Amino acid sequence: MTPAERPLSPFQLGSIYKLQLTSVLSFSHRATGVGLSVGTVFLVWWLVAAASGDDAFAAAQWFFGSWLGLLLLLGWCFAFFFHLCNGIRHLFWDAGLGFELRTAYASGWTVVAASGVLTAIAFAAGLLVRG
Amino acid sequence: MAEFRLPANSRIRTGVTHEAPPGAREVRKFRIYRFDPASGENPRLDTFELDAADCGPMVLDALIRIKDSVDSSLTFRRSCREGICGSCAMNIDGVNRLACTTSLHDLGREIRIYPLPHMPVVKDLVADLTQFYAQYASVKPWLQAQSPAPPDSERLQSKEEQERIDRPAACILCACCSTACPSYWWNSDRYLGPAALLAAYRWIIDSRDEATGERLDALEDPFKLYRCHTIMNCTDVCPKDLNPAKAIAEIKKMLVQRQN
């Protein structure tokens, strides 16, 4: 049996290899990055609508005020704060700091908590301003 | 490219169950990955029920017990049974560890055992480590020096210089770290992986080595080094409590610093 014919040992995260905070936060960082890129398209749509006139802007406002729009905004809000906080964590790593396993876990949980709290504050503030 | 499913020849079938011997007092279930290259069939997951009261305390003891008294064809690597040879690394209950230093007491009643993840399987729990070793060899893991050694002594180091390489040099090349790394799963053809990079770091910071520049040149590559995205599964899993993630970060820092 040549190496190419050999079966590949199972590796799937979750079912075969345990999901750990280390890998989950890393994948989340990438997923939120992709999510934010998609969100930027919607942000551009909103700005273009604002520049195009009352009708277009009203349509955009209606969409973002609908339950689906609010849900997407909540998602982007969390994605923004998570990507930001975890990005700061990456900056420390780039400086060679925070690599001890205990520190990495502590900073990981801090990122999760901070992005949750910041999302709640920002979203609540947004809803208040909207009235 | 990241793939999330196993290729068709690698999907796992349901295997056979070997029931516990009559009168067993403490039954533990071992679900073990089996692959027989001679059969031409896909891998399967066999279940072995074992009386833990009649078995040594470690996962390796259970595997040896199964091989001795239930199925002599069960194939796995083992040697020192004390965590220094690195032979019995495998995926035990979802995490890569050494079977010889993993206590059955720390695991549940049902224990899943697979070979090291995302590797070609030779047989059962034996993964093909050819590429892993080739990657290790590619970082030239030996002392390189132009200046001759002192005629009447070894190349000496200060205590501090020795302490810097103490930990990285303690790597046993078990491959737990590299095969726990999702980046290595998907780019192992071009990314060196945490184990080889830890070895590279060990020689880069060795005060006696004179090839530091060449070693750094060899690693300055988008794939060999920079496929590390600081996931930290490597450090999480190392059975010797080493820190490959930090070693890789230090190499990245050195590459930036030498540009100034």
Image (tube, rainbow, N blue to C red):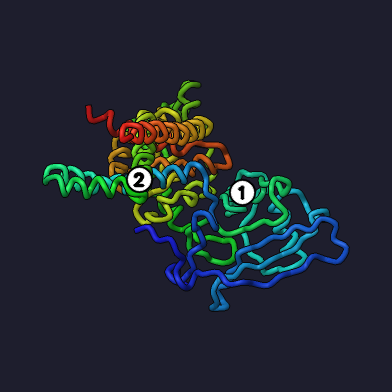
Task: Find residue B98 and name its label.
Answer: 1
Front residue of B25 and B123: B25
Residue B29 figure quarter: bottom right
Residue receiving disc 2: A70
Query: How many marks overall?
Result: 2
For mark 1, give the secondary structure.
Answer: strand
- Chain of the residue that carries numbered disc 1 in the rendered image: B
Q: Residues within 10 Å of mark 2 (few under 14, many from 20)?
A: some
Residue A90 figure quarter: top left
For mark 2, give the secondary structure.
Answer: helix
Q: Amino acid at mark 2?
A: Leu
Front residue of B163 and B185: B185
**Residue B172 image offset from top left, x and y in percent:** 54, 44
> Residue, x 66% and y 47% (percent of image)?
B102
> Residue, x 48% and y 52% (percent of image)?
B179
**In this orientation, does residue A87 appear?**
no
Residue A115 figure quarter: top left
Q: Amino acid at mark 1?
A: Leu
Residue A10 vertical position relative to residue B94 in the rendered view, above or below: below
Q: Residues within 10 Å of mark 1 (few under 14, many from 20)?
A: many
Which of discs 2 and 1 lies nearer the camera? The answer is: 2
**Residue B141 image offset from top left, x and y in percent:** 42, 42
> Residue, x 33% and y 49% (percent of image)?
A66
